[in-house]
Amino acid sequence: MTTRPDTTSAATWVAIDIAKHHHAVLIETPGGKQQRFRMASTLEDHQRLVDLLRTLPSPVRVAMEPTGDYHRTLAYRLLSYGMEVCLVSSVAGARYREAMFNSWDKNDPKDAGVILALLKQGITQRYVDPLLAGHHGLQELSKTHHQISLARTRLQHSLLTHYLPLYFPEVERFFSSSHADWFARFLLLFPTAASIRILDFEDFQREAWEAVGRKVNKRAWLRELYERAQSSIGLPIATDSTEIETFRLQLRRYQALIEQCDALSEHAHALLQGRADYEALRSLPGVGPILALTILAESGDLRRFAHHRQFLKYCGLDLATAQSGQFKGHEKLSKRGNARLRFAFWFAASIAVRMRENSFREKYARYIQSDPLNADRKRKAMTAVVAKMARVAYALIKHQTMYRCYAEDALPRGSIPLSWAVGTT
């Protein structure tokens, strides 16, 4: 969200180019006098900067070009002392620097000057400190779950593309979900097809029955697996060999990652259960504990957005068009917002359109009914559903209400033409 401060008011402007160990600082007082210096990312230098700024004319407006999370501690300290802090986009900084200096050349003092110019023109982004806003814990929980999920996915790909093709290629067709911890339990018992072939079917069924969990017609399922093992092309490796021990080591690690993801999901539900915003999001089709956690952690308080269009822009779900002269490109998502929010809404929408009945599925079906096999139209329809999911989530939290299927049927039909919806042009 962009802020436009009053550039005519007497204020002290502070531009800080953030780096890992040292920051470049440029200060301009109301009289136009500038002061440059370099500060270390230490408690002593943080306090010296605060003490200096408190002696200068107020209000003090500070802009930073963030690098990773290295700006967080300094921004928190400045906000704690009542100073205004905002961020400058690195993309805006790069383009402004090229226009100002007609050069790609860059250095920290020059970047600080660019940040100062953008700050004085009001080309900044509002900064909300997660710790002061009260959702820092949710962010850390969400990001930890995200990192563990990435590790689980990478390991899953390693199992499916390296270990199984070597030792038991035929078993891959039985793998159906990244949450299938039964798959790891089964392979720990039977890592190769040869470990199954040494048993008759009754013995195999008895040992594998509990490991594979709940299955429809489990006996027939095990029979098919047993028959495929008889004709496996897997390498003839002994189950007590070094190769199989490393395979089992990865399987146990895969189990541990699944357990950690499940534990974090349960912890998120226990932490948020009973909160009005969380319960409102959980009422949305396709939104579970982790997706609700991600939305709350990445958005903060959605009420800070004055209109749902601001929230869509924050998510990167607003439309953008490239136009020059007689050329006008197609409208498409800007994708200049929070990528994790876009992922959360896209994932929830993809689940909702596969459910039996809800307004998101109805919207998706209405979009593709003229050409159900057109992949491009399916993509555009899904984009429209994702944007609607974000709008509904914003409305539920803003009005403190639960999702009601087809509640929009009470509104006049055709109030928003289909051709105006996201991605239909």
Image (spheres, rainbow, N blue to C red):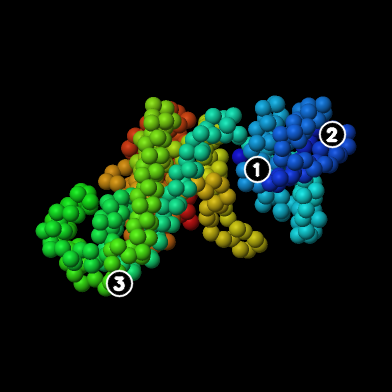
Q: Earlier in the sequence, mark 3 or mark 2?
A: 2
Q: Nearer the viewer, mark 3 or mark 1?
A: 3
Residue that badge 2 annotates: 29
On the rendered image, what quadrant is the N terminus found in? top right
* Mark 3 to mark 2 CA distance (whole Å): 75 Å
In the picture as drawn, the residue positioned furthest to the left comes out as 202
Report whether 400 appears left or right of 237: right
**Residue 186 vertical position relative to residue 313 in the rendered view, above or below:** below
Instruction: Say which residue appears at 13% left-offset and 58% top-offset.
Output: 203
Q: Is 197 in front, or is 15?
A: 197
Q: Amino acid at mark 3?
A: Leu
Residue 321: x, y in percent? 58, 55
Residue 280: x, y in percent? 40, 32
* Mark 2 to mark 1 CA distance (whole Å): 26 Å
Residue that badge 1 annotates: 70
Instruction: Say which residue appears at 38% left-offset and 60% top-offset.
Output: 246
Q: Earlier in the sequence, mark 3 or mark 1?
A: 1
Report whether 168 appears left or right of 282: left
Q: Mark 2 falls on what kind of element?
A: loop
Q: Nearer the viewer, mark 3 or mark 2?
A: 3
Q: Nearer the viewer, mark 2 or mark 1?
A: 1
Residue that badge 3 annotates: 235
* Mark 3 to mark 1 CA distance (whole Å): 50 Å
Q: Earlier in the sequence, mark 2 or mark 1?
A: 2
**Is residue 5 at least partly visible in the picture?**
no
Instruction: Say which residue appears at 45% left-offset and 44% top-offset.
Output: 145
